[in-house]
Amino acid sequence: MPVTSTSARLSIRNILFTTDFSAASNAALPYVEALAKWFQAKVVIAHSAAAVPALALPLEPIALDMDPEWESAKIRMKEFLDHRPFAGLESEPVICRGEVGIALPDLIKDHQIDLVVLGTHGREGV
């Protein structure tokens, strides 16, 4: 009986690149770009803006357009995108609220992420 060989090809359609816009995050850029080109995948570029600190008095939530952390995140994302980090590739910027470890599962689910690539300096929990 002849032996046949089959191999399954790994399919990666959506890559999540999380960034805090630091040099450590930027070190992951070439890997994300190479993987996205190889698999012809979409890159979701995500940044998590710090949550507004809880106040002692119960107040209405701060509107996003008045939140300095949110506005800063929007500006930093725009500056990052102005450098066209993934030119020629399909990409989507996303800004979310809160700690990245808490936001990550929702990002993965909502954007049907197959692979997460991030750079780290190793000083925090993620």
Image: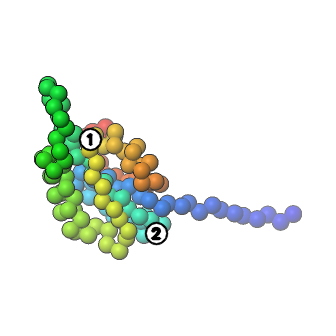
Q: Distance between the residues labelled 2 and 1?
A: 30 Å
Q: Residue furthest bottom?
A: 88
Tell which tag, 2 or 1, sits nearer the viewer: 1
Crowding near the residue tagged with mark 1, few <14, some 14–19, many ≥20 C-alpha atoms within 10 Å: some
Give the residue at x 34% y 40%. 101
Q: Is residue 57 left or right of residue 25?
A: left
**Of marks 2 and 1, which one's residue comes earlier in the chain?**
2
Give the residue at x 54% y 61%. 11
Residue 9 location in percent, x, y? 59, 63
Q: Which residue lies furthest to the top in this view?
A: 56
Pointer 2 residue? 40
Q: Are marks 2 and 1 in contact (CB under 8 Å)?
A: no
Quick one: SS at disc 2?
Answer: loop
* Front residue of 36 and 50: 50
Q: Which picture quadrant has residue 8? A: bottom right
Residue 78 location in percent, x, y? 20, 62
* Front residue of 104 and 10: 104
Q: Which amino acid does label 1 sit on?
A: Gly
Q: In this view, does 37 lie to the left or right of 86?
A: right
Give the residue at x 42% y 54%. 111
Residue 16 location in percent, x, y? 38, 55
Quick one: SS at disc 1?
Answer: loop
Q: Is residue 113 left or right of residue 72?
A: right
Q: The C terminus appears in which quarter of the rendering?
A: top left
Q: In this view, does 37 lie above or below 104?
A: below
Question: Where residue 98 is drawn, which disc sits there?
Answer: 1
Q: Is residue 125 above or below residue 112?
A: above
Colour scheme in the image? rainbow
Q: What residue type is labelled 2?
A: Gln
Question: Where residue 3 is drawn, which disc sits there?
Answer: none
* Front residue of 25 and 93: 93
